[in-house]
Amino acid sequence: MPSIANIAAQALQRRITQGEFPAGSALPSQRELSEQLSISRASLREAISTLEALGMVRSQPGKGVFVTAGQRPDPARPLRGTAAMSPQALIEFRAVLEPAWAALAALRIDDDGRQRLEAIQHGMEAALKHCDLVMAADWDLQFHLLIAELSDNPGLMSIASQFSEQIGHSLRLPFSNPAGIWEPADEHRLIIDAIVSGDASSANRAMRSHLAAAANRVGIDFPPL
Amino acid sequence: MPSIANIAAQALQRRITQGEFPAGSALPSQRELSEQLSISRASLREAISTLEALGMVRSQPGKGVFVTAGQRPDPARPLRGTAAMSPQALIEFRAVLEPAWAALAALRIDDDGRQRLEAIQHGMEAALKHCDLVMAADWDLQFHLLIAELSDNPGLMSIASQFSEQIGHSLRLPFSNPAGIWEPADEHRLIIDAIVSGDASSANRAMRSHLAAAANRVGIDFPPL
DNA sequence: GTGTTCTGACTGGTCTGACCAGTCAGAACA
DNA sequence: TGTTCTGACTGGTCAGACCAGTCAGAACAC
């Protein structure tokens, strides 16, 4: 059973990370917070000691308790700077994350995951046979997001869903050579084969090759990482 | 002027890291410690809250306050406040992102960036000289966040600030071997040298080595990516 | 002599109320 | 108009009381 001070610390931490108290702002006074939370000021002070040790707040005698934690972006507003992400920055961003998603997915693949990858690949191929590029792009995005999901890492998964819109946009960039509309699906097949066989380094390389080829198709330099 | 509670926390922290209280042992009772330190039990409890948040001790009602520094954290159990990410998942997450930050920072380093890296390193070294592990952990986090900033990629930068809380937590995990408190700063030096000289692949490797060593220090397996 | 139950003295946790020291907006004053 | 003072805030510290958990050893039953 966690202590009252720990429960209070977690409650305040949630409120801070959910944006109720942006970085730089002062928390309500200790006396006010202890009333709000129906706990004593001594217990509240223990909670604040915890938050201070975690680097989330800083107390200043006579002034207040100020939030120092990094600001969580406003959900209604695009991420700071991401609205301004150039295609170059986005491909660079993907080059950092997606090979790692693929490698982790390969390490953790199970039968259910294999089936889902195959189903998406079949969907994408069917859409291409019908020359339905919009539907193919949807399957394309599902493919990348599924790989993030199969990485089974909460932080990486949350980034994937957070940036799914931008990734989706980058998948829709016009091809420099429209004749190559099957290339992405062919490259996906190689990625799936590596993931399904559990080969992390092959999955990493296949994803990097795919992203490099995608960058080349839209005339963007691929980052030398 | 640090508070009495912070001074007490630092005094106890020093005694723990210097081996006076080995992992698993109980500290003297709160009533006894408050007498020894000539402070109230309320102030002592605030100090203990700080140590608990840093993962150095664990209180158990009716039994005592036990030293956990140097013990291997349970990788399946989440850090306090980061319910979604286990220490294992977090180090994996960082293993994906931070080498890339370092590599991009190396490609884009300028004189201002070089100065800021040096200033943070000096700050961290000064804190270690004073045995101030809380302050050193703050500088440690600033180091990692600055590298993300110097990567100059909006998506990666937003991830850094978004996960700064979790990264900060992982920097505060107790060391399996408390004697090695200078190792992170030494490893940071190698990373800075690689970034400052503009060598992307050296910066990538130096950061990976640092993260592997950090994982090893807290008894967590480093992901084979 | 052995097993069970109880109890007192510890432990940590929480609270109340009092008071100290720092801060600052606005009143009072020159 | 500029300076000083003050009251009402803020956080920091303390003492003391009491609650709930733990457990070694005493008391008791067989």
Image (cartoon, coloured by chain):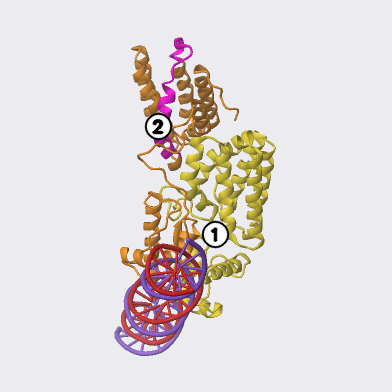
Chain colours: A orange, B yellow, C red, D purple
Chain designation of label 2: A
Query: Hey, what amino acid is under mark 2?
Result: Ser
The residues colored magenta run: A156-182
**Disc ID at residue A164:** 2
Find residue A33 and report its image quarter. Answer: bottom left
What kind of element bears circle 1?
loop
Query: Horizontally, is B9 left or right of A134 in the view?
Result: right
Measured as percent of width and height from the top left, residue B185 is found at: 65, 52
Measured as percent of width and height from the top left, residue A14 is found at: 38, 53
Which residue is located at x 55 percent, y 41 percent? B149
Label 1, label 2: how far apart the Cα atoms are: 39 Å
Q: What predominant SS class does the magenta segment belong to?
A: helix
Measured as percent of width and height from the top left, residue B195 is found at: 65, 39
| Residue that mark 1 sits on | B71
Which residue is located at x 65 percent, y 50 percent? B119
The crowd level at tag 2 (other Cα within 10 Å; few <14, some 14-19, many 20+) is some
Measured as percent of width and height from the top left, residue B89 is found at: 48, 45
